[in-house]
């Protein structure tokens, strides 16, 4: 039996435009945060409740980093697959830890879910934590899956004349 699996799948909206920087070796690194929300009806009050979680995402794959840099903006809806990594850093003499979803190598996916020309779709998540990007890394990947299209979404190219 295989030892373990480290895979993260998220569908959410970007909280801000992607931040692009370069490693010492010149490799492109892209950072952004994704908001995922869970909604439910409170049993006691009957009110609709919502909880938003923020996930830090780091892209080391050259191809996916280029897609993120050129096409993703605040509010963009994306589907990502990557792995969870925790790293340690020091700030003001204090050791700190951060956990990120990392897209690198062949086991990573980035799919844009907005419709053509949809941009951010008008969704602007509130209250994104202010994360300081850090670390360095390299790696490359040819695994990229940009997708953009209506696919039955309102305003798409649906034919009104159904032949049956």
Image: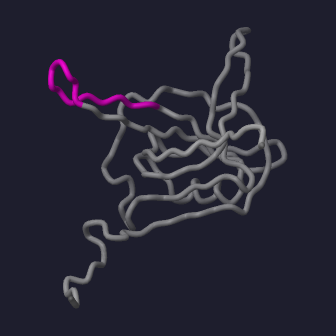
- 43 versus 53 height, above or below: above
- 163 versus 98 height, above or below: below
Q: Specify the quadrant that holds the C terminus.
A: bottom left
Q: Nearer the viewer, residue 16 or 88?
A: 88
Q: Is residue 164 left or right of residue 117?
A: left
Q: Specify the quadrant that holds the N terminus.
A: top right
- 20 versus 155 height, above or below: above
Q: Position of residue 21 (x, y in %)?
A: 68, 44
Q: Nearer the viewer, residue 67 or 37?
A: 37
Q: Is residue 94 left or right of residue 124?
A: right
Quarter-wise, where is residue 128 in the image?
A: top left
Q: Position of residue 44 (x, y in %)?
A: 18, 18
Quarter-wise, where is residue 137 in the image?
A: top right
Rendered residue at 15%/20% (across/down)? 45
- Residue with the most extreme front position: 1
Colouring rule applied to residues: one colour
- Residue with the most extreme right position: 25
Q: Which residues are magenta?
A: 41-53
Q: Position of residue 23 (x, y in %)?
A: 77, 43
Q: Is residue 157 left or right of residue 93?
A: left
Q: Is residue 35 left or right of residue 124?
A: right
């Amino acid at each position: 039996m295989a030892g373990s699996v480290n895979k993260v799948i998220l569908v959410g909206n970007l909280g801000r435009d992607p931040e692009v920087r370069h490693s010492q070796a010149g490799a492109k690194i892209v950072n952004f945060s994704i908001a995922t929300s869970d909604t439910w009806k409170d049993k006691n009050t009957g009110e609709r409740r919502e909880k938003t979680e923020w996930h830090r995402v780091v892209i080391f794959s050259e191809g996916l980093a280029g897609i993120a840099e050129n096409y993703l903006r605040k509010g963009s809806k994306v589907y990502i697959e990557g792995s969870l990594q925790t790293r340690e850093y020091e700030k003001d003499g204090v050791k700190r830890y951060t956990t990120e979803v990392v897209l690198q190598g062949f086991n990573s996916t980035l799919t844009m879910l907005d419709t053509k020309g949809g941009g951010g779709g008008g969704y602007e998540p509130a209250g994104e934590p202010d994360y300081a990007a850090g670390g360095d890394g390299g790696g490359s990947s040819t695994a990229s899956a940009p997708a953009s299209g209506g696919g039955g979404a309102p305003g798409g190219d649906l034919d009104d004349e159904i032949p049956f």
